[in-house]
Amino acid sequence: MIPEIIKIIAIVLLIIFIVKTTKFIFKSIIFIVLLLFVLSFFYPSFPLEHVKESFKLGVKEKVAEKMEESKEIAECKLKQGIWQTNSKGNKFCNLPTQDQNKTCFNSDECEGLCIADNETTGHCQDYNYIKGCFKILTNQTKDKQEEICFD
């Protein structure tokens, strides 16, 4: 009840001030302020409550996403994986291959690719997802290396 009385008194004081001022600019500014004040009396907080609720929902969603991502990162580390972001910006768990660093003569001997260490031997790739350019050994390229690139 008291806030309404204070608003009414403020409106009356503003009306008196408008009548006393002689310049048009001041009257216009005061009229706009008075109009906004009166509108806030009838519509006290609708826009602000709407913004506050939207903000709360956005924060809740972001916290939930971060918690889910933290859980995924922990699961990834348990599997000896590396949490990475690919070239498209998607985050994922890059898991190690079962035969990482095993000596190989061609890619048929590996879960992934046989990455060349020299002309005839190489090692099996470390992780499922690799990035960069590599010389690989395949059955089709006996005694030759083929260069291949990944994003």
Image (cartoon, helix red, strand yellow):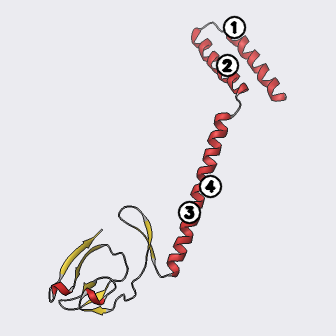
User: Which quarter of the picture shows residue 49?
Assistant: top right
**Residue 140, x across and y down, in percent:** 17, 84
- Name the residue type under label 4: Lys
Query: Is the residue under label 2 in contact with that under label 3 (CB below 8 Å)?
Result: no
Compared with residue 38, is residue 84 higher up or lower down, i.e. above or below? below
Question: Residue at left 36%, top 75%?
Answer: 129
Disc 4 and disc 3: Cα gap in Å?
10 Å
Q: Is residue 51 above or below residue 8?
A: below
Q: Quadrant of the N terminus?
A: top right
Disc nearer the start of the sequence (3/2): 2
Spot occupied by residue 61 in the image (x, y as percentages of width and height): 59, 55
User: Mark 4 vs mark 3: which is more N-terminal?
Assistant: 4
Rendered view: 11 above or below 97: above
- The answer for how far apart the CA atoms under marks 2 and 1 are is 13 Å
Label 4: how many Cα within 10 Å (few below 14, some 14–19, many 20+): few
Earlier-in-chain disc, 2 versus 1: 1
Q: Which residue is nearer to you in this view: 6 or 90?
A: 90
Dot 2, how many residues are within 10 Å of its Cα: few (below 14), some (14-19), or many (20+)? some
Q: Earlier in the sequence, mark 1 or mark 4?
A: 1
Q: Residue at x 68, y 24 (%)?
A: 39
Instruction: Report which residue position mark 3 lands on.
Output: 66
| Residues marked 4 and 2 touching at CB (< 8 Å) | no
Quadrant location, the C terminus? bottom left
Q: Nearer the viewer, mark 3 or mark 2?
A: 3
Q: How many marks?
A: 4
Q: Earlier in the sequence, mark 4 or mark 2?
A: 2
> Disc 1 designates what residue?
19
Residue that mark 4 sits on: 60
| SS at badge 4 | helix
The mark that comes first in sequence, 3 or 1, is 1
Closest to the camera, between mark 4 and mark 2, is 4
Q: Is residue 57 left or right of residue 12?
A: left
